[in-house]
Amino acid sequence: MLTFDNVRFQYDSEDFSIIDHLSFTVDAGEFVCVIGPSGCGKSTIFRLVNKLLTPAEGTVLVNGTSIEKQKNYCGYMPQQDLLFPWRTVKENLMLPMEIQGGISKVEMEQRADQALESVGLKDWGKKSPKELSGGMRQRAAFARTVLTGSDLLLLDEPFSALDYLTRLSMREWLLEQWEREKKTVLFITHDVEEAVFLSSRILVVENMPITHLKSIEVPAEYPRTREELMRPEIVKLKEDLIDMLRRETV
Ligand SMILES: Nc1ncnc2c1ncn2[C@@H]1O[C@H](COP(=O)(O)OP(=O)(O)OP(=O)(O)O)[C@@H](O)[C@H]1O
């Protein structure tokens, strides 16, 4: 589904590469978390996928084709929900379809209503985003990301600004959405517990510049429960991951 083929990238203002001949693949339908120390280049990987940045060398491919000439092949959800305060919640959800064009207003409204219902915000469409709680805003932002119609979703620390309990319920909620929508999800987090709870596979940034990502399978079936995270092999995996991240930040 997503392939990095020998990708190198360097910011103009820097004299070194952040990403250096990196290759990796994410298969269709996977839920993959990317973890690594702050500032190592995780968000840069996302910006190379959504074409905010262009590789200096190498190719990013989606479904076997370079993204250069592709459109609407990924949905991106940043850390902050970025809902526009001057639009209602429903109008925010309609935005990606307006940008895409060619969809009638009636159809856009229907799709937005359906999406709001699917994320438990059926009666909130006419409200302003500021009337929603943090968790509700993130659910609306997720629905908007899904409404891009893309099979590949890039979620960049979407729950990091939420309080602990809301985070816990949002993780469970996100897995339900993923199992229903059958999308491919790439999810950046700093939180080892979050990565282990959510993903089928974890990609760990082991070095800077990023030359490779260490791939670790999470030995747990879906649906996941918090109790499952207490199994000895999962606890050991979390400890190993924390050790890896500590080594990188020393
Ligand atoms: N526009 C830019 N120009 C120059 N350097 C940049 C730019 N954006 C990011 N960087 C640098 O590139 C490096 C990687 O940044 P990036 O945001 O990808 O890291 P990250 O792993 O996502 O960090 P965090 O976990 O803190 O969000 C950092 O050292 C950052 O300072």
Image: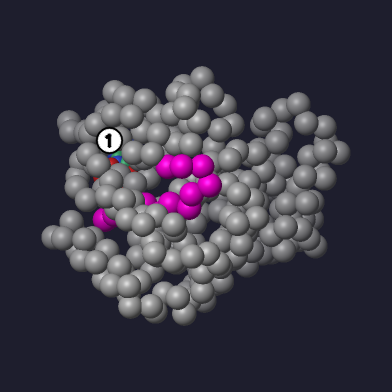
The quadrant where residue 130 appears? bottom right
Q: Is residue 193 magenta?
A: no
Query: What is the count of numbered marks?
Result: 1
Left or right for 191, reference 140: left
Left or right for 188, reference 106: left
Would you say residue 170 is visible in this rendering?
Answer: no
Q: Residue furthest top?
A: 69
Specify the quarter for ligand 1. Answer: top left
Q: Residue furthest left?
A: 250
Would you say residue 149 is visible in this rendering?
Answer: yes
Left or right for 90, reference 181: right
Give coordinates of residue 18: x percent, y percent.
Answer: 24, 38
Give coordinates of residue 75: x percent, y percent.
Answer: 56, 41
Under mark 1, the amino acid is Leu
Provide the residue designation for mark 1: 22
Residue ID at (70%, 36%): 97
Residue ID at (76%, 58%): 117
The quadrant where residue 106 appears? top right
Residue ID at (42%, 42%): 26
Left or right for 45, reference 223: left
Give coordinates of residue 24: x percent, y percent.
Answer: 34, 39
Vertical relation: 191 (above or below) 58: below
SS at badge 1: strand
The span shown in magenta is 26-39
Q: Quadrant of the C terminus?
A: bottom left
Give coordinates of residue 127: x percent, y percent.
Answer: 75, 58
Vertical relation: 242 (above or below) 210: below
